[in-house]
Amino acid sequence: MRIADDVNRPGGEVFAAGFLIFALFLLSQIAVETAPAKSGNIVAQPRFWPAVGTVTMVAFAIPHLLLQWRSRLPGRLAETRVWLGSVEFCLWFMLYVAAVPVTGYLAATLAFTVLLAIREGYRDRKSIIAAAGIGFAIVFVFKSLLSVRIPGGAVYEYLPSGLRSFMILNL
Amino acid sequence: MDILISALDILARWDVAAALLVGSVGGVVIGAIPGVGAAVAIAILLPATFSLDPIVGLTVLLGIYGSSMFGGAVPAILINTPGTAVNALTTYEGTPMTRRGEAHRALALAYSASFCGGVFSVVCLMLFAPGLAKIAPLFGSREIFLAALLGIILVVLAHRGKVLAAGMLAGFGIWLNTIGLEPIQYTQRYTFGQSWLSGGIDLIVAVLGLFALSQAFVLLIQRDKTSHAEPITGGLLSGFKELARHKRVAGASSAIGVLMGVIPGVGEFTSQFLSYTYAQKTSKTPEQFGNGSPEGLIASEAANNAVPAAAMIPLLSLGIPGEALTAMMLSVFYVHNVIPGPSLFQNQLDFVVALYLALLILNCMVIIFLIFSTNILLKVIETPTRFIGIIVLTLGFVGVYSLRNSAIDCAIAAAFGVLGLILKRLDLPIVPIILGMVLGNIMEAKLRTSMMRVKSPLDFIDRPVSFILFLIILIVICSHFRALWKSRNRRSENA
């Protein structure tokens, strides 16, 4: 009986296998990672809902993997490489996260948008100015206008007191 | 009358007016950019709205939710690329019309049908939400548990052809919600000895990763797609005249949109496919469908625009979100200690009416904006997609970091971003994870409370509402397996 998986893409079986391994690992850890309660019925046990989640994961992941494996398509390695390629942008993102408390939101954002634009191949002057303009606009809208909670950079400590307060509050 | 005046008073503020403007215009622009969509924008803006008044924050988010599909029709018609995924069927009719030199007519029809669907849906929200809120006191813990369970089941079964994947991802969402300190016995669950996991996985971090960061990664790794569309000349109000000639299709599609919007987990996709099929089957010219049929265009646009306000009905009256966007909005309610459900209608009816009015005004503002600014939107559509990826990633940082200024949250969101990218490339659904997290939380709390008063399993369904919900669950599951059985028989007959 066909109950799922009309959709099949290259690499589908790799994800399905990885998901099943992860689900089985979680299920195997349930006794270690959850504590039993001394009293109360089964649904009041702290491990009841983690068990519902992990058992559901395993129960659906097994037939999903079987169906994906049966109708697997070529190109799984190329697809896996694409997934791993996205890790590069995770690193860009985390570098940006690390830079903000040091250099301040404005400088980090300008550097991030401009450098990422160059990395993506937008190297003409117009594109770089556009990337910097967008970075500034984002900082202005969110920090200066909407006052979202993003702390000032450590380098702001070296600024004169009036300018420092302005930078901490607005940029 | 007093309630209406009080609601108008809530709306008559400069910040609410600004929110209406930002929500409507922002939603249209975001919807018009292929590859962004309302979910990404709402996920990014969510933490920023926490510091705003609930009515202001919700107006912005509702505006984006409701108006993005208006904007999504523009690239769907002019460049054969749906701005949001739910404008996919619009391309079937809009693009052939554009090729015939009828782009102006197609846009006018799409705008008027979207407006019709949107307004119809708000009227239904006004009529039905108070009614549902009246029966809502009949919903105790076990009824809310069963309603949430029904929501999960519908979300899984609604993903036709991907039911197994949806099921395992819903289970993943339920498991994610259990990470951290358990609220009754105060024991740790799945923290692996890591203190940063004690607080659990924040829903907003997961949402931002799965929707916003994943979309940024998708855009950044692919080749640039730039498009060019010819400017539109002439007024766009003529669509209303043509819509009046197809009022049966417009009315039925809006009604289908409302019905599908109310049912958890179904949403815009099913509504537009159902209404499109209905329009084709009842049309005098079914052969035109796929070749630029005005009826097909009306069916698609009216149905998908009727969903947002309808999706607010179960959220406002029962506190149960039916899909990812209303699940995100639920967090805005909670942050401001406004608890959706019957008490909201009893204690803050003016707030609810103000939300209805805001939705109505939003639809009017969107149509006015579109009539005058379609050609400006064409410039936005021409932005290269990888450049949009840079913008989404930069905005994603604001969303995650402004929550708690935590680098760990950002790392978790980035990990969810990679997961979201994989799911998107494999065409697997993301929504079950989010609804698993939200509804899993509701189910855990309500099942615990209800089991204290239940001695045998039959006691669980001994009240009318719980019994009806239980029956609906049985019917839904049985009809799914019946449909599968039929499909299997049909296939073996054909083989």
Image (tube, rainbow, N blue to C red):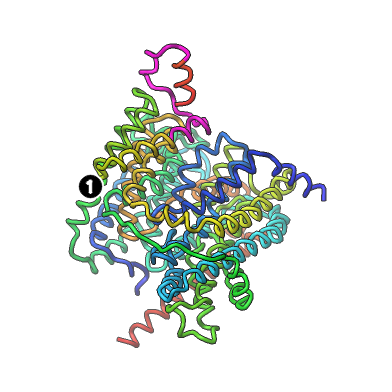
Q: Residue furthest front?
A: B233
Image x and y of residue B230, in percent: 41, 64
The residue that appears at 48% across and 17% down in the rendered structure is: A165
* Residue B332 falls within the magenta-colored stretch: no
Residue type marked 1 = Gly
- Specify the quadrant that holds the C terminus of chain B: bottom left
Image x and y of residue B336, in percent: 61, 37
Q: Residue furthest right?
A: B1
Residue B88 seen by the camera: yes
Count of labels shown?
Answer: 1
The residue that appears at 19% across and 59% down in the rendered structure is: A76
Q: Which residues are magenta?
A: A138-162
Residue B19 found in image quarter: top right
The residue that appears at 65% across and 64% down in the rendered structure is: B120
The residue that appears at 54% across and 43% down in the rendered structure is: B331
Q: Which residue is mark 1?
A: A85
* Residue A153 falls within the magenta-colored stretch: yes
Please say if B40 is above or below B406.
below
Question: Left or right: B483 with respect to B314?
Answer: left
